[in-house]
Image (cartoon, rainbow, N blue to C red):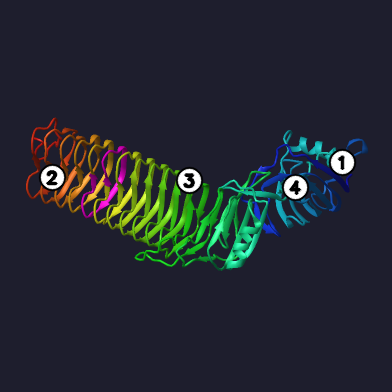
């Protein structure tokens, strides 16, 4: 009517709930871990209000009732009402009171009768969104006739008729809320958590809890110190303060769960492992694991984590390891799907990480490794599908990354190796195959930066920087094949930049730079097939830029550059060769 309003709206969502990782909350309640808000749920609902004109009103007086009456330009209306929204998937309903005020200026633009400027505000409250206040302005501009004709048409309308051209009033947003509570599973291992425990770190509580809670469980340890521990199948052991990923069983939404408290210490100074893995589908996160050894002390059996054999689906992350007398992490034979991530591994009596035989699907990423007596990461025989990414290895007694024989499908990316006691990366013996090394920096190894033993194949080295190796930059033994070296830089090796012994075939070197060498830029024995293109030799080569010590090599490639100096010859050749290395504008080709 002219003075009063009564309105009711209904709302029906036309889309399903959507995943909302940013809104999800994961928490412990009793012996359970739960997620709330895995989805954002649009709500069905209803709202209504009653309004009254407090003063003013654009009352007409025309039409059948007689002559037009002058309009009142200003009016104030007040509204009070409430709302209720809910859905089956919603964690709780959204319901409460609301009130509105509208201050209207009619004919706000004098040349457009029927125009209106409305300044409005709304105050509402519910237990989900708490108090909510909105303020805004709305401008209405009519289409159609203008000037005196429009004014007379508007004036001819009655007050009730003017109310009938009011706009609809709807809720100003789409009302959503969090989905209801649901159980979760470990995102990385897939284990469904049927139970959870929070314990303070000490020997009895941790060991007893892990044994008592059984499989399909999460155990969170808040601080303290515990001794030797066993973790069984389908268990997650999490330190306080760390965050693991969990996924809602119903919604499929993934969110982080941060364990309450602080990182616990698990300590064992006996010649036995600190943590034994005695099952599959195990997740360790946020632990400090410490033994009795150091980088110069060997205490057989005092490993940080012993994975044993025939394990699968193991995740180790966000942990700190120190002072282990044996390997920090060791897996023996026939393990699969092993992930070691975002951890610090320091002070080992042997290797930081060791995989023995026939392990597959190994992912090692975001590790800091230092002060180990033997190798940073050691792969023995017949391991496959290996990924090493974003790893820094400092101060190893032997090799940064070591591969014995018959390892395959190896990807090494974004790795830095400093101060290796022997080689930076070594492929020791026969049958290592399908190896990709990219974005790697090797500084100051005592021997070769990259050492490839006999009988390996299918290597690609790309974007590698080598600084001051104690022997060669790249050292290839005998009978290796299909080797691609692209965009590498070798600075001041004590021996040669590149060294090829016998019968290395299918070798392509492109866009490489050798900045000086204690002996040669490149040297080779016999039977090698090497294509070298767009490669630069600069700086001082104490012996030769190119030294070919035996007959029977096949050479090729063009666009190479020599801008350095040599202590003996630019190109020293013994015996007959097939083809040449072409140096346009250089001192000569090789052989000339």
Going from N to C along the chain, the mark reached first, 2 or 3, is: 3
Label 2 neighbourhood size at 10 Å, few (<14), some (14-19), many (20+)?
Answer: many
Tell me whether circle 1 and circle 3 mark residues in contact (CB < 8 Å).
no
**Distance of mark 4 from mark 2, alpha carbons?**
75 Å
| Image position, residue 402 (x, y; %) | 34, 49
Q: Which of marks 1 and 2 is in front?
A: 2
Q: Nearer the viewer, mark 1 or mark 4?
A: 4
Residues 295 and 368: in front is 295
Which is more foreground, mark 4 or mark 2? 2
The image quadrant of residue 531 is top left
Q: Name the residue under label 1.
A: 68
The image shows residue 177 at horizontal and vertical percentages of: 72, 49
From the image, tell me which residue sits under label 4. Answer: 90
The mark lying in front, picked from 1 and 3, is 3
- Reading the chain from its start, which is encountered first: label 1 or label 4? 1
Looking at the rendered image, the quarter that the N terminus falls into is: top right
Residue where numbered disc 3 is placed: 335
**Nearer the camera: disc 2 or disc 3:** 3
Secondary structure category for the residue under label 1: loop
Residue at image coords 66%, 45%: 249
């Amino acid at each position: 009517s002219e003075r009063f309003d009564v309105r009711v709206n209904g709302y029906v969502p036309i889309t399903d709930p959507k995943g909302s990782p940013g809104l999800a909350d994961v928490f412990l309640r009793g012996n359970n871990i739960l997620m709330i808000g895995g989805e954002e749920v649009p709500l069905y609902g209803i709202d209504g209000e009653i309004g009254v004109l407090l003063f003013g009103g654009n009352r007409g007086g025309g039409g059948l009732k007689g002559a037009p009456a002058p309009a009142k330009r200003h009016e104030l209306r007040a509204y009070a009402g409430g709302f209720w929204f809910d859905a089956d998937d919603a964690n709780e309903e959204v319901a409460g009171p609301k009130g509105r005020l509208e201050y209207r200026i009619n004919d706000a633009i004098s040349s457009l009768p029927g125009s209106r400027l409305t300044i409005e505000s709304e105050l509402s409250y519910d237990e989900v969104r708490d108090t909510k206040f909105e303020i805004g302005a709305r401008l209405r501009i009519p289409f159609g006739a203008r000037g005196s004709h429009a004014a007379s048409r508007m004036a001819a309308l009655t007050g009730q008729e003017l109310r009938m051209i009011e706009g609809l009033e709807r809720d100003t947003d789409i009302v959503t809320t969090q989905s209801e509570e649901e159980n979760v599973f470990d995102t990385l291992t897939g284990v469904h958590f049927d139970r959870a425990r929070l314990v303070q770190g000490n020997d009895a509580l941790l060991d007893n809890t892990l044994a008592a809670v059984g499989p399909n469980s999460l155990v969170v340890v808040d601080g303290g110190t515990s001794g030797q521990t066993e973790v069984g199948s389908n268990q997650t052991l999490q330190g306080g303060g760390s965050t693991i990923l969990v996924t809602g069983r119903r919604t499929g939404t993934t969110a982080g769960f941060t364990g309450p408290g602080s990182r616990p210490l698990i300590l064992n100074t006996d010649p036995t492992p600190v943590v034994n893995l005695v099952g599959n589908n195990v997740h360790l996160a946020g632990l400090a694991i410490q033994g009795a050894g150091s980088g110069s002390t060997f205490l057989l059996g005092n490993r940080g984590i012993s994975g044993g054999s025939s394990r699968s689906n193991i995740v180790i992350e966000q942990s700190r390891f120190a002072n282990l007398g044996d390997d920090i992490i060791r897996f023996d034979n026939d393990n699969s799907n092993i992930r070691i991530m975002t951890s610090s591994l320091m002070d080992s009596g042997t290797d930081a990480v060791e995989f023995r035989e026939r392990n597959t699907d190994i992912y090692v990423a975001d590790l800091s490794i230092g002060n180990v007596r033997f190798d940073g990461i050691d792969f023995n025989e017949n391991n496959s599908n290996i990924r090493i990414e974003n790893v820094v290895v400092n101060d190893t007694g032997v090799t940064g990354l070591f591969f014995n024989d018959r390892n395959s499908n190896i990807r090494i990316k974004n790795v830095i190796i400093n101060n290796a006691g022997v080689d930076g990366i070594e492929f020791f013996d026969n049958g290592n195959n399908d190896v990709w090394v990219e974005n790697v920096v090797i500084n100051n190894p005592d021997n070769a930066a990259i050492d490839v033993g006999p009988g390996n194949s299918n290597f690609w080295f790309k974007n590698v920087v080598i600084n001051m190796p104690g022997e060669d930059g790249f050292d290839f033994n005998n009978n290796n094949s299909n080797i691609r070296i692209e965009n590498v830089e070798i600075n001041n090796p004590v021996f040669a930049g590149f060294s090829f012994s016998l019968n290395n075939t299918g070798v392509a070197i492109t866009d490489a730079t050798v900045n000086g060498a204690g002996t040669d830029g490149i040297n080779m024995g016999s039977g090698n097939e090497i294509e070298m293109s767009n490669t630069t030799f600069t700086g001082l080569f104490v012996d030769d830029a190119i030294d070919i010590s035996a007959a029977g090599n096949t050479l090729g490639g063009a666009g190479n550059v020599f801008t350095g100096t040599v202590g003996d010859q630019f190109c020293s050749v013994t015996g007959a060769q097939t083809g040449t290395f072409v140096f346009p504008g250089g001192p000569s080709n090789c052989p000339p």
